[in-house]
Amino acid sequence: MIYKASDRRYKNMIYNNIGKSGLKLPAVSLGLWHNFGSVDTFENAKLMVFKAFDLGITHFDLANNYGPIPGSAESTFGKILKEHLQAYRDEMVISTKAGYLMWDGPYGDGSSRKYLISSLDQSLKRMGLDYVDIFYSHRHDPNTPIEETMMALDQIVRSGKALYAGISNYGAEATKESIKILNDLGTPLLIHQHKYSMFARVLEEGTEKVLQKNDVGCIAFSPLAQGILTDKYFKGIPQGSRAEKTTGFLQKEQITNNLLQKAEQLNRIAQMRGQSLAQLALAWVLKNPVVDSVLIGASSSEQIEQNVDMLKNHILSLEEEEQIEKILKD
Ligand SMILES: NC(=O)c1ccc[n+]([C@@H]2O[C@H](COP(=O)([O-])OP(=O)(O)OC[C@H]3O[C@@H](n4cnc5c(N)ncnc54)[C@H](OP(=O)(O)O)[C@@H]3O)[C@@H](O)[C@H]2O)c1
């Protein structure tokens, strides 16, 4: 089967400028953390990438360790790119990261120059790419001077192996420092990839202000709290869901009664708006002015379709915002 992208792919997506840069990202981006590994069905992975691209999702987010096995999501994506999407490479923003454990020994973890640069070389090979669009330091490593990590990002961008530099999972102080060092080096920080959802609001505790003040972009990961902010767990843990799979990062214990009760109340607001809870949860994340893109995960093309459809009804009224806030604070 030869894939041809939909001619309508740019009709309905919203594209937002990222910080001070000229780069735009789609309001909805697709992450390949789950369901793209060697344990997953290649055909389904391929259909999800096609569906996303057809809906205007130009941004695909990876990391060296996504799988399982670690690295296999990049290999899957590389295969899809090579077989079907080569003609569209310049219409895509592809990101990867390094920061968590990837290989044995002292050089396969953390944020040293040694690890970041060799890991990116491996990622490029797995994906069959000459460069990625965004390369992230996946976490702040207290055992590496932050200057070294930022100098590695600067070197990576100058070498042409990435077009932009990003950080992820950095706290407010480390973010502030990174911005300053990268500015001094002449490779401004493009974007911070931060966890953010109705159930995870640490972003609001300081980092949000730093990003706003410095006009740095923000992409919000796990906006559906890995699926808890959908209706799927209302009647138990369904077969094939992330919490049910042994390879999933969502533990059953994380789906507490308290969260489920809140999710059910939020679902009532979603129903009044004529949308699904997943759609309401995404709209809520997008309403934060610091957020440029919601970075979703998916296990099917239908989920991607439903999630992008949220853009048809993504503005919340003041009253709805207040009702949501009350549910979350109770
Ligand atoms: N920088 C970091 O440290 C970091 C950490 C985590 C994630 N990320 C990035 O963020 C991306 C997204 O994270 P995430 O997968 O946790 O995001 P998420 O959007 O919160 O959760 C995705 C899961 O929610 C369920 N889902 C999605 N749409 C649905 C719908 N319409 N109806 C019902 N269920 C739906 C699916 O679960 P089922 O599989 O159960 O169907 C899907 O796998 C990752 O792929 C990765 O790129 C980055």
Image (cartoon, rainbow, N blue to C red):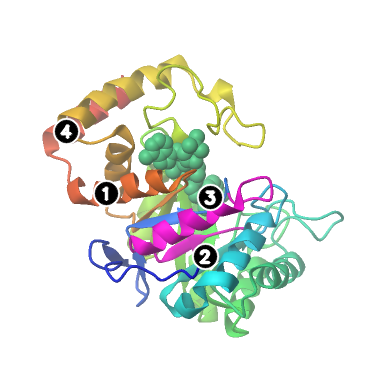
Front disc: 1 or 3: 3
The tag earlier along the polypeptide, 1 or 2, is 2
Q: Secondary structure at mark 2?
A: strand
Q: Tell me the tag on residue 44.
A: 3
Front disc: 4 or 3: 3
Q: Nearer the viewer, residue 146 or 163?
A: 163
The tag earlier along the polypeptide, 1 or 4, is 1
Q: Which residue: 59% across, 51% down?
A: 36
The residue at which mark 1 appears reads as: 309
Look at the image and tell me in which quarter the C terminus lies: top left
Above or below 158: residue 226: above
Q: CA distance from mark 4 to mark 2?
A: 33 Å
Q: Nearer the viewer, residue 81 or 177?
A: 81
Write the start and end of the magenta stretch as one range. Answer: 36-63
Find residue 274 and report its horizontal and vertical position in percent: 17, 34
The residue at which mark 4 appears reads as: 320
- Give neighbour class at mark 3: few <14, some 14-19, many 20+ (Cα, 10 Å): some
Q: Is mark 2 within 8 Å of ligand 1?
A: no
For badge 1, the amino acid type reads Asp
Front disc: 3 or 2: 3
For badge 4, the amino acid type reads Glu
Residue 216 falls within the magenta-colored stretch? no
Is residue 187 visible to the viewer in this orientation of the structure? yes
Q: Secondary structure at mark 3?
A: helix
The residue at which mark 2 appears reads as: 166
- Give neighbour class at mark 2: few <14, some 14-19, many 20+ (Cα, 10 Å): many
The tag earlier along the polypeptide, 1 or 3, is 3
